[in-house]
Image (cartoon, grey):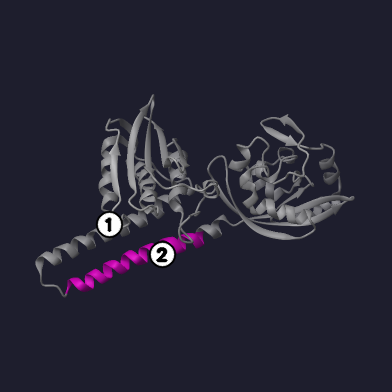
Amino acid sequence: MFEEINLVTSEVGSHAMIGYHPDQPVQIIQNKQLVSFVESISQMVLILNKRHQIVYANQSYREFFNSPEIAFFLGKRPGDAITCRNAVYSKYGCGTTKFCKSCGAANAIIEALAGNRSTKECKILTSKNDTIDLRVTASPLNFEDEELTMFSIIDISHEKRRRSLERIFIHDILNIAGGISGLSAILKDIDNPVEMREIADTIVGASQNLIDEIQIQRELGSAERGELTLHYSEVQTQDILNELKRLYSNHSLNEGKIITVENNENYSIVTDRTILKRILGNMVKNAVEAIVPDDLISIGCIGNGSKVRFSVHNNSVITEEVKSELFKRFYSTKQNGRGIGTYSMKLFGEKYLKGKVWFNSSPEKGTTFYFEVTI
């Protein structure tokens, strides 16, 4: 993305400062008129140099990221300062990875340096697995014959979350409630006891699905607010895998795909059973929903020292473009407004159960999701 930049790196702490000139930020800070203007803006504002590095960060920005000292941000690019996962795990940081080509923030900055004001949206997955939705505006700024960029940021995470939850949650519960209503209407006109029992069983299952959808939303909201309470108990891994096989072999989403349990060794772990099933269930659900004819889904668990590693495999392939986005909130390869499942895997699995969630995908081996947790 930034081939035009001459990368000159010097290590400062855990971050690589690329072409950073320490005297430049002082010039910005000493210009009282410019600083006063930037600080008067209620939204977050950065001033960037032509290398996309921060030379000033206003108080709103510093408070949002809980770092009151400007020095913490100086010389870093926006993705490095926010600890964007792609930037942190890259040798040269923000703007130099293959994923940056689709980043709204990076593209807005490039357009501003070309002399155009640009507003875009971007979704950042941080190194702590927090997802931040931002609306950014980059504007050209000439300061003492230096080409700079005024980079304003609005956190639209709540707005995105509310809209997406409305689409997902209301859509799902209306579908389930509509099914229950339709079956109930049919039930009163049927005299055959066998048919009545079959429809009644279907209504019971649909009602349980409705309760489950409501519970999922409540758990997710509590987890994002840091209020989720865990209930630990001793869990047998073989029981969990067998439950998942029974549930998703007969699930309405499963159109004849076979689910097998591999690695029949049983392990006893202490964890929150409900949350563990939620994580693994989302993995199985993703495999079931993958558009792969006659797919075979295998689930398993193996011991790994003091840890156990759950796995869910199917024959689908995840593209490079999707790989970088997969664990972000509400990102989905399916219809617009979906995408809670993979995001919640990370949230529940790593933030709450203190494990590790990841995946491997290739045309030769298909896709496997993993969840590793301490016994």
Q: Position of residue 43 (x, y in %)?
A: 69, 56
Q: Secondary structure at mark 2?
A: helix
Q: Residue furthest right?
A: 144
Q: Quadrant of the C terminus?
A: top left
| Res. 41 visible in picture | no
- At label 2, the amino acid type is Ile
Q: Earlier in the sequence, mark 2 or mark 1?
A: 2
Left-right relation of 310 to 108: left
State the predominant SS element of the stretch in magenta: helix
| Res. 337 visible in picture | yes
Is the residue under label 1 in contact with that under label 2 (CB below 8 Å)? no
Residue 355 lies within the magenta run: no
Q: Quadrant of residue 96?
A: top right
Q: Residues within 10 Å of mark 1 (few under 14, many from 20)?
A: few
Q: Residues within 10 Å of mark 2 (few under 14, many from 20)?
A: few
- At label 1, the amino acid type is Gln
Instruction: Tell me which segment is drawn in magenta.
Output: 162-188
Residue 208 image label: 1
- Up-down: is 200 above or below 2? below
Left-right relation of 266 to 315: left
Q: Quadrant of residue 168?
A: bottom left
Q: Residue furthest top?
A: 305
